[in-house]
Amino acid sequence: MLTQLEDLWNYAQSISNDDGPNPEPPEFKEINRETIQKTVEQIDAKLAGNEKASSKSKAKLHYIKQNFEKNLEKYQEQEAILGERKSYSKTDTDATFMRMKEDHMQNGQLKPGYNAQISTENQIIVNYTLHQNPTDTKTLKPHLENLKETYGEEVFQEMEDITADAGYRSEENYDYLQEQGLTPYVKYNTFDKERGKNYQKKHKPFSKENLHYNQEEDYYVCPMGQKMHKTHQSRRTTEAGYIQHLSHYGTTNCEGCPLRGQCFKAQGNRTIERNHNLERHKEKIRELLTSETGL
Ligand code: SF4
C-alpha cells in the first residue's frame, strides 16, 4: 500500500496545476496513520477537479481511503512479529528464513528454521541456545550469557579458554570475551590465508599490514621511508550495531615516487585506515593459535 501511495503522490505532483513548488514528500518508509491521512488529503486536493487526473488514479485513491486503516493495523502486527528480523514463517512465526547447510535442490533456497548453538566441555554438551538470527557472530554473546545464567557467575568465572571457529569472530565478540576474562581461541577471517605460502610474497612490502608502525608516536612508515601521520579518527557502526573506532593515516607527498605504481592505485597521496583495537586482538589470537596449546 505504501508503494501505491508513493506512486500516487508522485503522479499527483506531476499533473498538478499549481504553479508553486511541490510540497515536501512524506517519508514513505516509516509511515503512520496521521501521515497517511494527510498524504491522502493532499493527493485528493490535487486530483479533484483536475481534468488531467486519470480515472485509474482516482480509483486507486478511493481504494487506499477505504482500506488503509485496516491494512495499517495488519502491517503493524506483522512488524511487531518481525522485530529485527528480515523474514518470518507464516506457519511458525518464531522461525526465520535461513540458508541451510542441507540443500537438496542445490539452489540455496531459504527455509524457515532456527540457528541452534551448542557448547561443549570435554565433549559433553553443557549449553544450547536457539536463535532467530542466521549469523553465528551475533549468537556468541547471548549463548555465553545463557550459560552464565544457567550455571551461575561462579562457575562461569572458572572458565578459562574458549574455542570457536572464524564464524564467531568479530571485534565486538573479542571485546566481550576479553571483558569476561576468557582466552579466545577464535580465528579471525584471514588467519589461514596469512599463514599460506604465497601470502607474505604477495603482500610484501606494500600492504598496510606490513608497514612499520611507531606506536609511541602514532605514525606509520611507508616503503620509501616517508612518515604517515594520523590525519583523523572516524567511527563505523557494524551491522550488529557495534561502534568501531578507526584511525586514518596518510603521506604528504607521493608524487614522483619510483614505487608509486606498485604501492597503491588511487589518486593523490597514499592513505590507510587502521582499527587498532581489532589489530590488537588479532595479534593476541595469532600468538594463541600458533602456541603449542593453540596448535
Ligand atoms: S608511493 Fe607514496 S606511500 Fe608508496 S612508497 Fe612511494 S612515497 Fe611511500
Image (tube, helix red, strand yellow):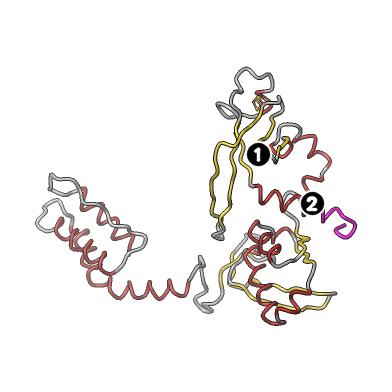
Q: Nearer the viewer, residue 44 or 158?
A: 158
Report the residue marked by disc 2: 286
Say which label, 2 or 1, has the lower sequence index.
1
Which labelled disc corresponds to residue 218? 1
Q: Amino acid at mark 2?
A: Arg
Reply above or below: 280 against 269.
below
Residue positioned most to the front:
216
Residue at 74% across, 36% down: 203
Q: Nearer the viewer, mark 2 or mark 1?
A: 1
Does residue 264 lie above or below 209 as drawn?
A: above
Mark carried by residue 96: none
Tell me which segment is drawn in magenta: 287-295
Residue at (50, 67) in percent of width and height: 84
Please state if 207 lies on the left or on the right of 110 as rendered. right
Name the side, left or right, on which 164 lies relative to 114: right
Q: Pointer 2: residues within 10 angstroms few (<14), some, or many (20+)? A: some
